[in-house]
Image (cartoon, helix red, strand yellow):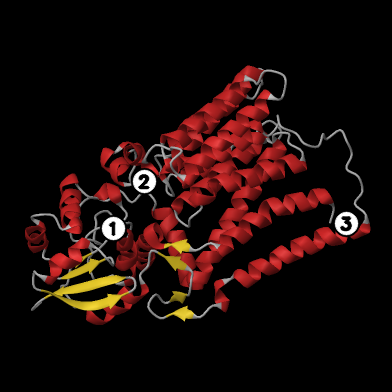
Amino acid sequence: MSLSRLWGALAILLPIVAALAATLSAVDLAYHLRAGEQILAGGGIPRVDTFTFTAAGRDWVDQQWGAQVVLAAVYRLGGWTGLVVLRAALVGLLFGLLFLACRLRGADVRSAAWLSLAAFIVAAPALALRPQLIGMVLLAATLVLIAARRTYPRLFYLVPVIVALWANIHGSFFLGPVVLGLAWLEDVRDKAPSAPRTLLVAFAAALVTLLNPFGPTVWTYAVGLSTNPEITARITEWQPTTLRTIPGVVFFASAFAVAVLLGRRGRPTGWPTLAWLAVFFVIGAYAIRGVAWWPLGAAFAIAGLVIIDRESTPERPTPPIGRRINTAIVAALVIVGVVLLPIWRPTDPGLGAPQGVLTDAPSGITAALRVTARPGDRLFNPQPWGSWLEFALPELPVAIDSRIELFPVATWSDFETVASGRDGWQSIVERWGVTLMLVPKGDALADELKTEGWQRIYDGADGLLYARTGR
């Protein structure tokens, strides 16, 4: 294995190994699995909420139904281990495609590898297994076709197909027409004959986003999700990116690094490149969740400008000992990846998953609810656990889950009143017909429940469970 091939392998294998080592968060994943299973079972794409009792019957624009089908199908085939492997495969594909896109933009092998690995470091907090990760892969695939649009013009017509799929996967589909518009600006600047074709494909990509079960409503959903004040007030990842968080520090540091690299070139950077950087910087600065997209767009934009090894300099032949060392490095990474697979771990009986795989899924509470929950019960729960509980116990309606946009402002206000034990919480619980109360350890609400006739039926490291007396 030559040194250049080692760089290419590292750009893909290192993110894969990191993905295998990371846990799966159930916060979003679990409700997507339940919805996907419902679709696969013949129940159709959800149109109204049936998971909670506070939003039951409300319209649900389940724009991410395509990703849910993929996730549920993999879970059917391979369980939690299958999902771990899927996440690792998606992460490897994402940065493999980004590496290829950078190469097609003119970067040498080592530059493309470094850009891909730097993008991985910046995007790492956003690589949870959820529809967004599939959307990131689709963006990377789109960037590859954009980079090759002048060399392989026929392949460029696949972009609308990707965007049509994207519109049924994740709300980030709007980035498809956006990056095509940026590519068109490059063609205009370069006076390329392909400019009309690029503009045509951009219009086609915008049009095919309507090929989904909800029609133009998906655009309202995508825009509304990021501008809804209730969401931005309650969910950290939808708040503006600041230096008060680690992802924010990494984001601004990477933006500064890009500025320094461009400044050291000694000649002006073309305005289309600056447009690429500006668009993705604004997306990253607008919300912490947008940081995921910045490194992909930035790496692509500067790929042909920041070159470590000039292509005009032939690569020196790698001596046999060097090739053996390179091969050993790759083999070691593969072995580490195999060792990290969850199939070697014992199963957590409460979760039905290999130990250490899931987070935001309380094992003891889940096991207790399986024993104590009865038909007709309603569970008041902390919001981060809602997604897991409605997946693990589908017959038990929960109060709140991670579909933040689904719940009216009044419901959120009532939920926060109960969760904090403020005056009036008892009447809200009565109105909602709650029969089970799930409280985190040390929560002030636990003291209130002791004096209000609730019986503690579980006390574990992950929380407390109370039942209404006489339920």
Image coordinates for residue 55, horizontal then vertical, percent: 20, 55
State which tag comes first along the sequence, 2 or 1: 2
Mark 2 and 3 residues: CB-CB less than 8 Å, in contact?
A: no
Say which of 467 and 191 sits in front. Answer: 467
Q: Which residue is mark 1?
A: 383
Look at 39% across and 45% down and name the residue there: 237
Q: Residues within 10 Å of mark 2 (few under 14, many from 20)?
A: some
Q: Residues within 10 Å of mark 1 (few under 14, many from 20)?
A: some
Q: Is residue 135 above or below residue 442?
A: above
Look at 28% across and 58% down and name the residue there: 383
345 left or right of 264? left
Q: Which residue is mark 2?
A: 236
Look at 57% across and 40% down and name the residue there: 296
- Residue 395 can be seen in this image: no
230 left or right of 328? left
> Marks 3 and 1, Cα distance to the nearest angstrom?
53 Å
61 left or right of 159? left
> Marks 2 and 1, Cα distance to the nearest angstrom?
13 Å
SS at mark 3?
A: helix
Mark 3 is on which residue type?
Gly
Quarter of the image where the C terminus is located:
bottom left
Image coordinates for residue 365, horizontal then vertical, percent: 30, 74
- Residue 230 can be seen in this image: yes
Mark 2 is on which residue type?
Thr
Image coordinates for residue 233, horizontal then vertical, percent: 29, 42
Q: Which residue is mark 3?
A: 322
Q: Residues within 10 Å of mark 3 (few under 14, many from 20)?
A: some
Image quarter of residue 266: top right
State which tag comes first along the sequence, 3 or 1: 3
> Marks 2 and 3, Cα distance to the nearest angstrom?
47 Å
